[in-house]
Image (cartoon, coloured by chain):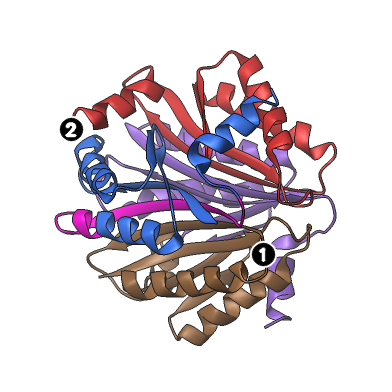
Chain colours: A blue, B brown, C purple, D red
Amino acid sequence: MSVLINFSIFPLDKGESVSQYVARAVKIIKDSGLPYKLGSMGTSIEGEWDEVMEVVTHCFEELKKDCNRVYVGITGDYRKTGSDRIAAKVKAVERKL
Amino acid sequence: MSVLINFSIFPLDKGESVSQYVARAVKIIKDSGLPYKLGSMGTSIEGEWDEVMEVVTHCFEELKKDCNRVYVGITGDYRKTGSDRIAAKVKAVERKL
Amino acid sequence: MSVLINFSIFPLDKGESVSQYVARAVKIIKDSGLPYKLGSMGTSIEGEWDEVMEVVTHCFEELKKDCNRVYVGITGDYRKTGSDRIAAKVKAVERKL
Amino acid sequence: MSVLINFSIFPLDKGESVSQYVARAVKIIKDSGLPYKLGSMGTSIEGEWDEVMEVVTHCFEELKKDCNRVYVGITGDYRKTGSDRIAAKVKAVERKL
């Protein structure tokens, strides 16, 4: 009974290298204490809806400080049953390969 | 100084026809009073970050009531300058065609 | 028996104003002859899978010419039944509001 | 000079458990020989544009066989420079934490 999201955030006005901005967001995700997994196209975060959205909001506010344009992408997957889904979903697929 | 999002939400456990669930979300968006535009692949909503996220949260809570699995997609575009961006962004592109 | 996509494409290395790049993509979409609808967070395009992907590929190649970093977002919705879905999906929801 | 995508695909008409369908797509990705990384909210795939899009097309055709409605999500990141970006992008962020 949790939500799993893939979250990406980056500025459009800072040139083609944006990893320092991504890192500021990931630091906030890390400090939140929620289970997360950094990926090449976004970070997976797991928690209750309000918990993950609070983290996303903090990341947005951090980049908003010094960025004129910020792009945010969130895909969320809520399921009534299941837990530890960052790992469990991958395992469920791997078992069927 | 607002955020423009494209928002889509639908259940996975209700079969291939999901428009009645989408309509419950769109009703919440409509009742919020924020500027919005219904599209075939999502609804554009404009407002302050906290405003649009509150609407998104209400939509999620509505579908969570009777859906076992819910998918959410959000893309957000924050820009320090500009207003009435649902219409303005389309016009800016059309002028350049 | 068609695919409906929402498609967005923009460079990261050209500063915060990207509408001239978006317009180059939309011009290609327009010239393709496929049904489309320009929105504030992407363009809806309808057609067979290979048709819409060919248009998306042309847009990408166009921006690749003079952009060092390009972001692409595609969400697709295939349904065996139905046609004229850019309009039909919106109407199906509006009827239920 | 490659494209990195996050790719997710799933049916809407098969109930809330979709991992067997996801596995059919991931098997195609694996057999393609392209670098990939399975995640909880999508699979990262790296290659030339035409290569990754060919794999995505094969996955779509596979699910289309027996699904009435299929949802596809693709986010792509093209950069003129760089290689082995599935690992490199994560490392670039981790170094800055």
Residue A77 horizontal/vertical position (percent): 55, 52
* Residue range corresponding to the magenta coloring: A61-81
Q: Is residue A35 above or below residue D26?
A: below
Query: The disc labelled 2 sits on which kind of residue?
Result: Lys
Residue A32 location, x and y as percent? 28, 50
**Residue C51: image x %, image y %?**
70, 40
Task: Determine which residue is flagged by label 2.
Answer: D96
Viewer-nearest residue: C58 or D61:
D61
Q: Quadrant of residue C48?
A: top right
Tell me, yes or no, if residue A85 can be seen here: yes
Left or right, residue A9 beside residue A67:
right
Task: Give SS at disc 2.
Answer: loop
Above or below, B28 against A94 in this view is below
Task: Specify the subunit that label 2 lies on.
Answer: D
Disc 1: host chain:
B
* Picture disc at residue B67: 1
Looking at the picture, which amino acid does disc 1 mark? Cys
